[in-house]
Amino acid sequence: MSRTPIREAILRLVDLGLVEMQTNRFTRVAAVDLSAQVQRTEAAIPLIALSARTAGPALTDDDLRRAQLLFAQLRTLDIERHGRHEGLDLWYAVYQILVERAGNEIVSGILLDQLGPHLRRSAQNTVEPDVAAFLPVYIDRLEQLFLARDGDTIAATITAGITQTVVVPMRRFLGTTP
């Protein structure tokens, strides 16, 4: 294997904040502050909800087709085999549809550029049983709401979904469950 793919993979890990690199000095795994990641994730929830309220009624048929493909991938994703990060990337793509359709450049910039990598980093590698049981119901419900273009209910469902599948398990892991 040549050095190029390895170098590119390391640069992607640097972009995600998982690796620190200083040219000609060192490359090391970045320290992870789970508490800060919980706070970033909680900060992203209202931004996604705001986008959902605005975008819901404005979703185009193309947006709905893209979302349905993502929901289908989420239904068939084997998290144990593919890893939780692949699932998070799919969820991130669903939320990105809402943010793009909302047309709010400030929210889009904050969510997609600043918080996106932190949302991906914020998950544990294992899925708790209560989360695994919740996901199929959440996927079906969110898909129905997308098709109905119901922005307010999409916002409420996303808020509950991210809280239940990401924030609560992370807080439980940190021992800071309210």
Image: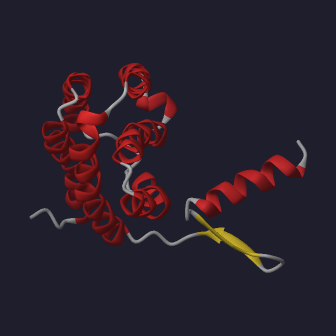
Quadrant the C terminus occupies: bottom left
Could you tell me residue 137's position as x and y percent? 19, 25
Could you tell me residue 134's position as x and y percent? 19, 32
Could you tell me residue 169's position as x and y percent? 23, 51
Q: Quadrant of residue 88?
A: top left
In this view, 34 is above or below 13? below
In the image: residue 117, left or right of residue 63:
right
In this view, 150 is above or below 122? above
In the image: residue 136, left or right of residue 71:
left
In this view, 155 is above or below 134? below
The colour scheme used to paint the residues is: secondary structure
Asked whether residue 165 appears in the rendered view, the answer is no
Residue at the far left in the pictured view: 178
Residue lying at 44% horizontally and 52% vertically, measured from the top left:
120
Residue at the far bottom in the pictured view: 25
Quadrant the N terminus occupies: top right
Q: In the image shown, does 97 or 120 lie closer to the viewer?
A: 97
Residue lying at 39% horizontally and 19% vertically, measured from the top left:
72
Q: Quadrant of residue 53?
A: top left
Residue lying at 79% horizontally and 56% vertically, measured from the top left:
7
User: How many callouts does the rendering have?
Assistant: 0
Q: In the image shown, does 60 or 126 lie closer to the viewer?
A: 60
Could you tell me residue 108's position as x and y percent? 41, 56
Asked whether residue 114 appears in the rendered view, the answer is yes
Residue lying at 34% horizontally and 72% vertically, measured from the top left:
36
